[in-house]
């Protein structure tokens, strides 16, 4: 077993919380003999090890202690109690522009940050062109960092971090602000560093990225370790807990219904919309609910690659609708419209609706093998034909589900059904001996 490069033994970290600035001053004037603060414990007795060359992911809700833990590994913070041992050069990409002087130019900050990480000036000179080329911010590298956009700051910070030959690379959510093109380049670079044996500590809310690169994963919850182990096992527990929490929240916010009304409601009607990012339309007919089921009609909390699902959408007419069309759009975690369909596209003409009518439409889908990411369903209803219609209701990202991990590696976005054959005739010809002469 490789030696650990990061070792935490019972690490706890607290921050003093004061009700007012005056309380801090009074405590200082008493030489800390009088206590005017309360302690907030960001970490509680955290114990774990990270092996050399391992990609170790940390997940958890906001405020769970992830960033505090990374700052302790980076040496920015010291634990209140316990011991944290780090072996190796650490390069950290934690917060936007952390370590950058906004008054200095990008070039000056490259030299400053690389020097802090222990590189001599001659070595920085040798690597500067590579750093500038990877960052791709052009002439802005000669301008003060305070003039940069957040994405440009991340580009430069990440480029410096990966070009100082780190033995341990810490990556926080800073990459989330980058554009898709640069994020993809960063993830490819992370894979390259993995192959070179660099230890990577990766914190992200992008579960698809965690499942793609994590050897092991730790779930932090309110400063304590909730689970640690193989990435698939820990992520599954985390997602299940988040679904349960979200369901409890929905039930809490759901208006109380009368017993008589609930007892007469048809079972196929869906009357909940888990999420509404944006909604628009003329409202003549509206979506009143959406859910995703397995092929046996059971609600799904996790999508499985190469499985059959049912997308169930219920709608209610507020006016007469001559040619109702119901459909949905499937989006990936980057907000890209991945696929979609509707009743007209599938050759199914719905009957006209009178005011007050409620329809429920089931879309039976065979999912391909998709990469493990989050996918959202945006339901819509219109009046008309495929070529001439008026939008009545559209709900962006009404329900979002995580795609599970496929048995095989997914290269790109999805795996196409494929059959491999070897041309036996060519093989036979290649083994035929050359005819002898004479």
Image: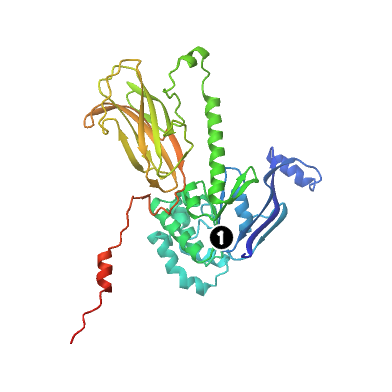
Judged from this view, the residue extending furthest toward the top is 260
Q: Please state the horizontal and vertical placement of residue 115, each as a whole percent of the image.
A: 55, 67
In this view, which residue lies farthest toward the right? 33
Q: Tell me: residue 281, above or below residue 99.
A: above
Outermost residue toward the bottom in this view: 438
**In x, y percent, where is residue 87?**
63, 65
Task: Please tell me whether residue 177 is drawn above or below residue 139 in the rendered image.
Answer: above
Coloring scheme of the render? Answer: rainbow
* Residue 115 seen by the camera: yes
How many neighbours does mark 1 have within 10 angstroms: few (below 14), some (14-19), or many (20 or more)? many
Pick the residue in front: 44 or 218: 218
Residue at the location (52% across, 67% down)?
165
Residue position marked by numbered label 1 in the rendering: 54
Q: Secondary structure at mark 1?
A: loop
Q: Quadrant of residue 401?
A: top left
Along the line of sight, the residue nearer the viewer: 404 or 426: 426
Side of 424 relative to 193 (left or right): left
Q: Of all residues shown, which one is farthest toward the front?
A: 438
Q: Quadrant of the N terminus?
A: bottom right
As drawn, is 311 to the left or to the right of 54?
A: left
Above or below residue 229? Residue 244 is above
Question: Residue 47: x percent and y percent?
Answer: 68, 53
Asked if residue 206 can be seen in this view, the reply is no
As rendered, which of 122 and 144 lies closer to the eye? 122
- Residue 426 image-quadrant placement: bottom left
Image quadrant containing the C terminus: bottom left
Residue at (54, 51) in percent of width and height: 231
Q: Residue 400, how many percent across, how many down?
A: 45, 37
- Which residue: 50% across, 60% down? 104
């Amino acid at each position: 077993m490789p030696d650990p490069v990061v070792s935490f033994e019972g690490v706890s970290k607290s921050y003093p919380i004061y009700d007012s600035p005056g309380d801090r001053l009074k405590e200082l004037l008493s030489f800390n003999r009088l206590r005017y603060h309360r302690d907030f414990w960001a970490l509680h007795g955290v114990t774990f090890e990270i092996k050399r060359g391992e990609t170790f992911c940390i997940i958890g809700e906001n405020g769970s202690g992830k960033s505090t833990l990374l700052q302790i590994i980076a040496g920015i913070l010291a634990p209140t109690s316990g011991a944290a041992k780090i072996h190796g050069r650490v390069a950290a990409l934690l917060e936007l522009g952390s370590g950058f002087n906004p008054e200095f130019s990008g070039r000056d900050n490259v030299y400053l940050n690389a020097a802090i990480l222990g590189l001599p000036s001659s070595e920085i000179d040798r690597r500067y062109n590579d750093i500038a080329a990877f960052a791709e911010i052009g002439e802005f590298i000669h301008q003060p960092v305070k003039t940069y956009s957040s994405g440009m700051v991340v580009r430069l910070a990440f480029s410096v971090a990966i070009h100082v030959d780190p033995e341990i690379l810490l990556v926080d959510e800073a990459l989330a602000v980058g554009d898709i093109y640069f994020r993809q380049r960063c993830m490819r670079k992370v894979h390259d560093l993995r192959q070179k044996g660099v230890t990577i500590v990766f914190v992200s809310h992008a579960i698809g990225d965690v499942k793609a690169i994590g050897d092991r994963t730790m779930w932090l919850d309110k400063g304590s370790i909730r689970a640690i182990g193989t990435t698939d096992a820990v992520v599954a527990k985390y997602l299940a807990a988040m679904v349960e929490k979200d369901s409890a929240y929905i039930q809490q916010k759901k208006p109380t219904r009368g017993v008589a009304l609930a007892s007469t409601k048809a079972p196929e009607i869906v009357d909940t919309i888990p999420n509404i990012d944006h909604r628009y339309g003329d409202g003549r007919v509206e979506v009143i609910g959406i859910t995703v089921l397995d092929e046996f009609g059971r609600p799904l909390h996790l999508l499985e690659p190469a499985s059959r699902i049912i997308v169930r959408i219920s709608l209610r007419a507020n006016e007469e609708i001559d040619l109702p069309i119901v459909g949905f759009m499937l989006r990936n975690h980057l907000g890209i419209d991945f696929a979609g369909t509707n009743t007209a596209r599938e050759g199914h003409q719905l009957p006209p609706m009178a005011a007050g009518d409620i329809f429920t439409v089931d879309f039976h889908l065979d999912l391909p093998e998709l990469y493990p990411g989050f996918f959202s369903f945006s339901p819509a209803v219109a009046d008309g034909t495929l070529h001439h219609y008026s939008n009545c209701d559209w709900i962006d990202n009404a329900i979002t589900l995580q795609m599970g991990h496929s048995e095989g590696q997914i290269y790109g976005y999805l795996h196409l059904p494929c059959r491999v054959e070897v041309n036996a005739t060519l093989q036979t010809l290649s083994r035929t001996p050359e005819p002898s002469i004479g």
